[in-house]
Image: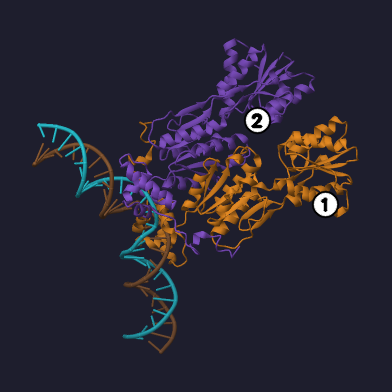
Chain colours: A orange, B purple, C cyan, D brown
Amino acid sequence: MTAETPSNPATGDSGARTVPTLEMVAALAGVSRATVSRVVNSSPKVTPHVVDAVNDAIERLNYVPNRAARSLASRRTQVIALVVPETTAKLFSDPFFATVAQGIALYLSDTDYTLNMLISSEAKSEKTRRYLMGGNVDGALVVSHHSGDHSYSELGQSLPVVFGGRPLIATESASYFVDVDNAAGAAGATAHLVETGRRHIATIAGPQDMPAGLDRLTGWRRTLSMHGFDQSLVELGDFTPESGADAMRRLLDRGVPIDGVFAANDQMAAGAYSVIYERGLSIPGDIAMAGFDDNYYGSTTTPPLTTVHQPSHELGAKMAEVLVALIEGKTVEHVTLMPTNLLVRASTL
Amino acid sequence: MTAETPSNPATGDSGARTVPTLEMVAALAGVSRATVSRVVNSSPKVTPHVVDAVNDAIERLNYVPNRAARSLASRRTQVIALVVPETTAKLFSDPFFATVAQGIALYLSDTDYTLNMLISSEAKSEKTRRYLMGGNVDGALVVSHHSGDHSYSELGQSLPVVFGGRPLIATESASYFVDVDNAAGAAGATAHLVETGRRHIATIAGPQDMPAGLDRLTGWRRTLSMHGFDQSLVELGDFTPESGADAMRRLLDRGVPIDGVFAANDQMAAGAYSVIYERGLSIPGDIAMAGFDDNYYGSTTTPPLTTVHQPSHELGAKMAEVLVALIEGKTVEHVTLMPTNLLVRASTL
DNA sequence: CTTGCATTTGAGAGCGCTCTCACGATAGCC
DNA sequence: GGCTATCGTGAGAGCGCTCTCAAATGCAAG
């Protein structure tokens, strides 16, 4: 309405609405700063009657603790960094990642921690590292699809760090991570295929240099070996629909019977669909299909794809939970695997 | 490797790796604290030779300014909040939103500002408001699909706030927002249909209580009226594929000639596709289709959908840019519209 | 009624930084 | 050469909070 000054209250112009301080609350409540501090931090040793008086003053002044001052004095920042390597950020539109981030944010909104999201490009990784090490955060969460981004793994030695997704090489024993139980999910999906009567079950596996690709293949093998079935029907893809189609083509070209396929993700399964139809085969009549991820690709195929749902939201929440526990000095498991659940749809009858 | 203590350096146990302070840098460089501060903040009035000495000391100690102390002393937090109403967060997997967030983060990574992401549920909106007003952030960005979430609009009076997406009622003159130029994008897509020879152009509009729905319809009208074409071929949808299919069905049931359709988003366009094929019509032979959003739905149809691409990444960056300008006391436009660009694909020849 | 102990409260010293102000040094001027 | 500007630098006072430590209070026991 007026000029452009009111839009910048930081300047402290106009009414000079001073933000209330601990001091002011103390004065109003007729106690000392220390006591107010105790109430604010819910220390047990304060007389109930005093607590009320202080809370009343806080309410009246609409007091909010100043984070900076608190953190300076307590040497705790109450800030958690969410580090997103830029390579992953490119895939930010990836629903999986976005949902993980959401889970993290939601979990933290119930705590006193604040989420600091930072995208670290290759070029500025040194800046990021410095920021993290400079005592500006209490801990860090690193979410990444690429295990190569574990250049941040060394961070774990001087700052609590929790990774989303397990590193390819688990030798970095000092680090903490939360991941989806890929192997169990894949084993479950494969078991479901077996239960529906399939006996010649192939898999379109993911890249074997990615934990998700590796573990899902392992899960498939686990179920097959449990039943003594043939484990030779493996073709690799790179998680794209095209690679799924190619892999399916190679599988069918083998000329051996195939009545079920477990694809390591929904994209590849969707790719496989087109090839199956090309060959005049039906789903699930001739071949039952199961995928992994539970995303748009699987839900829009005809018939809808049976798939392994990942608890991405819960994964994020768990990451945050583990980190907070770590920061607060509790002992926690280095590895946490989140259970998946099978979403049975028409592609497996 | 050892116990679980080393994983929590915050405790300050073990080697007690003290974080270097300004004081230490000053001592090492043989100058006063004030001078180091000047160098760190690149004040112009420091002798070059001294600057070097200080930078040298900073390098040697691996010094990083303590954010809390700095913010306490300067009364600036260098923190920008990204407020995501929970209703929007539910749609976090929405690529549009995720990309906007990414644009914001990326822009800020080049500044001295830090991004604080917070999801505010209805229940905790008071907590969020307090946090924002409590001097913990220098400004806030509010991203939301629902104009109803502008309960945060009042924030603008005491804190610099920039909204992503324009509010439905623009009377809140004091607020700043950045939006995609929906009307221009829609007008452009429609103009493209005209250019390819279409004369009977319908539209599947979005909800008229959402700015995006409203403005895209306006854009369609603008182009048609410019050419003196019939503007009666309007059916409303709610941005879902199903609603698009229904709207298309209603349009075709009118029994009047239609040779082009502008759908207010790709999802509805995809829904319309199925109905068009059901009726034995071809795309673009009988009917040319254009959408809006440029997402997965449009790119996977057959033929691929001509659509309006939104600069979501740039939108986020612009929001951050406007907010930073605002914080720094500069005068900026209240309204910023980001240009869209038309992605011509096979659905319009 | 005094002594001792537990428990609540207050005083005060920082946390690491910014920023005002005053100082000494250099430069420019008549 | 003495005078006033100009400039770079340092001293020191906080910013709002936490936390230690001591004082004050209350209460049970002697």
Q: Residue furthest top?
A: B228
Which residue occupies the foreground of this view, B280 or A208?
Answer: A208
Q: Nearer the viewer, mark 2 or mark 1?
A: 1
At a point 57% along the width and 25% down the height, the residue shown is B214
Which residue occupies the foreground of this view, A297 or A245?
Answer: A245
- Residue B197 at x, y percent in the picture: 67, 11
- Residue B317 at x, y percent in the picture: 51, 34
Residue A66 appears in the rendering? no
**SS of the residue under disc 1:** helix
- Residue B122 at x, y percent in the picture: 55, 45
Which residue occupies the foreground of this view, B124 or A141?
Answer: A141
Q: Badge 2 local density, few (<14 within 10 Å), some, or many (20+)? A: many
Q: Which residue is mark 1?
A: A223
Q: Is residue B228 above or below residue B48?
A: above
Which residue occupies the foreground of this view, B103 or B219?
Answer: B103
Q: Which residue is mark 2?
A: B295
Left or right of B159, for residue D22: left
At a point 63% along the width and 43% down the height, the residue shown is A97
Q: Is residue A87 above or below residue B274?
A: below
**SS of the residue under disc 2:** loop
Q: Callout 2, which amino acid?
A: Asn
Q: Is residue A202 above or below residue D17?
A: above
